[in-house]
Image: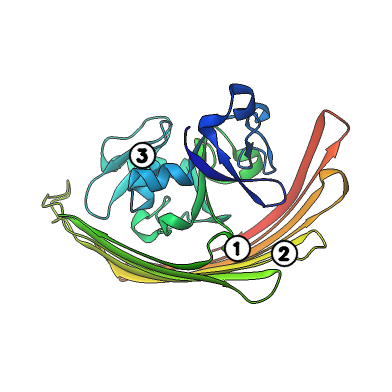
Amino acid sequence: MAGTAMVATAVHAETQINFANLSIEELGEIQVTSVSKRAEPVREAPSAIYVITHDDIVRSGARTVPEMLRLAPNLQVQQFSASRYIITARGFNGNEAAQNRTNKLLVLIDGRSVYTPLYSGVYWDMQDVLPADIDRIEVVSGPGATLWGANAVNGVINITTRKSGDSQGGFLEAGGGSRERSISLRYGGRLGENLTYRVYVRDLKADSMGTIAADGSADHDLSRTQGGFRLDWTPASGSALTLLGDVYDGESDNGLAGRNLLARWTRLGDGGAELQVQAYYDRAVRRGVFKVDTYDVDVRHSFDLGARQAVVWGGGFRHS
């Protein structure tokens, strides 16, 4: 990985790093969080992991999450229409029948699972993140179910956005081509010394690829408008509170709509200990197909046990 990117540490602070100037030993010290649910050097992470940095995403020109995931060599990304993607790990891709194997790949956006139980997979046309706001995407290859639970058998895709304090001021981006057009507007500011925010709105349109699907149905355009916000409160006491949410509406092969709200509180203790409590609500709607409301609560505690052992324990409850 080359270039400059923002990499998170255990206290959720972000440090500017120029990967091109780092030695192999220094690259091994880069912090990742998706393997053991705690910040650790990538050389000590007990799994194969690939990190797509913020700079990688900006330079690639990718406008959608599936196109960003093409940058990960440990994923297979196949597009069937303007809105329909199949993304798998460990092979088993190549036709739309492969979609029943995506139920073994856990996908998270800022700690919120985007798995749809009625589909047993991820509707990628319902997932959108402003590219300029993504801090990194960590892709774990292989089983992660011991810590992450359901769907984390073939791997974990963990998309993490930047703190609102690192996206201050105004931002306007527009782009287009023969089949795709998008415009994004974002503004970030401060409500106090330790309280920052950002709000955004984004409109994306993708034209039909002019093909006929395997089931004989015509290809469909994709049109989606999404807006959201993020608040970060970081008092000097070692605690951090994050509140974020999104709402979207659009048209694909079916009409789609949804909204979500997530709250996360983190407390740092002595000796690197960390306590995190997270809760979110998510509604996903495909008009005429399904409507799913998901409620999730998760508690995690991590601490060092001696010089060589680290303990991560906790529990969670999810109801759909």
Could you say which quadrant of the image residue 317 lies in?
A: bottom right
Disc 2 vs disc 3: which is toward the camera?
A: 2
Q: Is residue 191 left or right of residue 301?
A: left
Label pair 1/2, CB-CB below 8 angstroms: yes
Find residue 244 and report its image quarter.
bottom right
Indicate the colouring scheme: rainbow
Where is residue 221 drawn, in percent x and y? 20, 61
Q: Is residue 178 left or right of residue 57?
A: left
**Looking at the image, which residue is at 12% across and 49% down?**
211
Residue 252 x/y as whole percent: 26, 63
Residue at 44% of width from left, 69% of height from top? 186
Q: Residue furthest bottom?
A: 191
Amino acid type at mark 3: Arg
Work out whether residue 170 or residue 7 is closer to the camera in this orientation and state it.
170
Please state which amino acid type lies under the numbered disc 1: Gly
First reached walking from the N terminus: tag 1 or tag 2: 1
Marks 2 and 3 sit apart, C-alpha to C-alpha, by 34 Å
Residue placed under numbered mark 1 in the picture: 165
Q: Residues within 10 Å of mark 2 (few under 14, many from 20)?
A: some
Question: Which residue is drawn at the image coordinates 19% and 55% (left, top)?
Answer: 177
Element on which disc 3 rests: loop
Residue 209 visible at all: yes
Identify the disc placed on residue 234: 2
Q: Earlier in the sequence, mark 3 or mark 1?
A: 3
Q: Position of residue 56 (x, y in %)?
A: 42, 41
Q: Quadrant of the C terminus?
A: bottom right
Q: Amino acid at mark 2?
A: Thr
Q: Is residue 141 visible?
A: no
| Residue at 80%, 58% in the rendered image | 238
Is 98 located above or below residue 172 in the figure? above
